[in-house]
Amino acid sequence: MAELRNSLKEKRLQLGLTQAELAERCGVTRKTVNTVENGVFVPSTVLSLRMAAALGVRLEELFWLE
Amino acid sequence: MFRGGASVETLSARKAGMLGVVAIIYITQQIGNVGRELDTPRLIGWAVLSVLILGVLLTNGYWLMPKAVRNVLDDELTQSHRARSIRIALTVAMLSGFAFYATAPGLDWGIREAVHALVSLGLGAGLISLAVQEWRSTRNG
């Protein structure tokens, strides 16, 4: 079964953002950003879109199935 | 006062510890009550704590905080933790109900004692589950 992968950490670091800064931009706590980055938590479509917007990338660049 | 991300993070990190402490107090209180006739102050204390725990499971608490802060603290991850804890609380309460029903002839309990035990087991299980999930995500996060 395909699993959700993401490039959240890579894109975040490219912008020089900390997890806390990205969390604040997305209106969530840092632990949520961390668990999404680690693949522990699968975010909703709404949060995924908010994260993509906060990082200025398309959703498909941030999340994909593998 | 709590506009900055750091303050929300501090509250979020403290929550896991606070839930753990409340869980220990609640469980200790119930263990201490086993086989004892409960007086009114003890019953009121149990009822108040039970309602507060139910409120935390259903709404995440922080009722005195501004709504914007509450929304951040009750983000998707926390909502998923609460949903899982409520499922566990319901399951434990239902299983306890079945067990009490099946063993009722052998128990020297009235309806009040049975309801007290059922509510305490359900809420206690839900609270422990929430505390553990929040602690794990805080530790890893």
Image (cartoon, coloured by chain):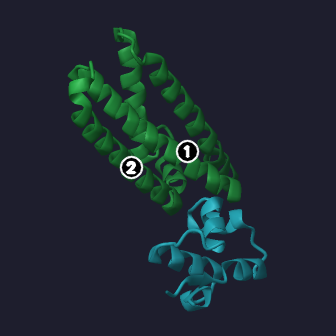
Chain colours: A cyan, B green
Q: Position of residue A23 (x, y in %)?
A: 63, 65
Q: Are marks 1 and 2 on the same chain?
A: yes
Could you say which is closer to the camera, residue B132 or residue A32?
B132
Q: Is residue B116 visible?
A: yes
Q: Chain of mark 2?
A: B
Packing grade of label 2 (10 A; few <14, some 14-19, many >=20) is many
Q: Say what secondary structure mark 1 lies in.
A: helix
Could you say which is closer to the camera, residue A51 or residue B113?
B113
The residue at the point 25 percent across, 41 percent down is B98
> Which residue is denoted by mark 1 in the rendering?
B131
Q: Quadrant of residue B109?
A: top left
Circle on res. B55:
none
Tag 1: amino acid: Ala
The residue at the point 55 percent across, 69 percent down is A41
Packing grade of label 1 (10 A; few <14, some 14-19, many >=20) is many
Residue most toward the front? Answer: B106
Tag 2: amino acid: Ile
Could you say which is closer to the camera, residue A54 or residue B41?
B41
Q: Is residue B4 visible?
A: no
> Which residue is denoted by mark 2 in the rendering?
B86
The residue at the point 36 percent across, 17 percent down is B44
User: Does residue B75 sit above or below A66 in this rendering?
Assistant: above
